[in-house]
Image: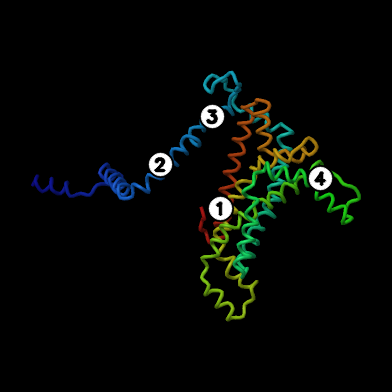
Amino acid sequence: MSHLITATHKQQPHQPGSKPRLTQRFKAFWADYARQWEIQSMVIPGIIFMIVFCYIPIYGLTIAFKNYTVIDTLSTAPWVGLDNFRIILSDKYFWDAVVNTLGISFLKLGIGFVIPIILAIMIYELNSGRFKKFVQTVSYLPHFLSWIVLGGMLITWFSTTGLFNELLVSLGIISKPQNILLDAGKYWWIATLSDIWKEAGWGTILYLAIMSKIDPTYYEAAKIDGASRLRQIWNITLPNMKSIISLNLILTVSGLLGSNLDQTLVLMNSQNREKAEVINSYVYRMGMSQGDFSYATAVGLGVSIVSVILLVTANKITSKLNDNQSVL
């Protein structure tokens, strides 16, 4: 009888999460790794990079809750709790930077998000292969130029003796030349349009890659049914681009508070600062120029938290529009 009880006990399956089950998973993992060790090993440098430059520095966020100076260390700086965040909420210059950031970001979202889609469709619809490559090359080129180069070009073009003033005067739009970059009221549009000029062509790459995978028979069937090119774009091209458009929208919305620092530092001057100062440049100025590292870290931490909230919210909204299927 005892022998039967012992045999029955040995035949009982292990419960999920038991040690033998974990051992089996561990062995299966190493078996998969051994079969593909060359490919799997290529990931290791990326993991090390992420740990060193993305995860270890997270400890530095404690500066936001301390009164840190250059003579302190992370461990010796005194704790001040939420005092830095209270200062942020009452800082007029910070809220001016928030307004400028949102103003520029919404302009880039409203205009700059749509233009790469339209440009990609126009390139895709071109019949001439040589002309298509030429347009792609010309539209990609500004992306590979730094903002130092492009900023210098814009500063020269917008000066009183620059290309734009000569063009506007010759067309009779303005009576006398003026330095456009010194006009704070025009800075939002300058920042938006120059960023679109630099990145619109580069932003078409993913869209063109998706469109190249669309089955040509869809277009042939639409032609037989008498659909025009615009109808084919609306009913075939755009629906097949829905997932990548949703993904880009999520990433764009999550970065609303992260305006281009390089662009701002190049184009901002003492005359347009009231409209050009964005959160990133404000954090840079407070941290690097004025040495208030605790305040700058607190601002950066708050912006990161809001960006995560925007990311999750945008993902939820786009998943509702995509039949509850998330693209992340």
Alpha-carbon neighbours of circle 3 within 10 Å: few (<14), some, or many (≥20)?
Answer: few
Q: Quadrant of residue 85?
A: top right
| Residue 255 x, y percent position in the rendering | 61, 46
**Residue that mark 1 sits on:** 316
Q: CA distance from mark 4 to mark 3?
A: 41 Å
Give the amino acid at mark 3: Gly
Give the amino acid at mark 1: Lys
**Residue that mark 3 sits on:** 60
Label 2 or label 4, whichever comes before in sequence order: 2
314 relative to 12 in the view: left or right: right
**Residue that mark 2 sits on:** 44
Are the residues at dot 2 and dot 4 in contact (C-beta closer than 8 Å)?
no
Alpha-carbon neighbours of circle 1 within 10 Å: few (<14), some, or many (≥20)?
Answer: some
Q: CA distance from mark 1 to mark 4?
A: 41 Å
Label 3 or label 1, whichever comes before in sequence order: 3
**Residue that mark 4 sits on:** 180
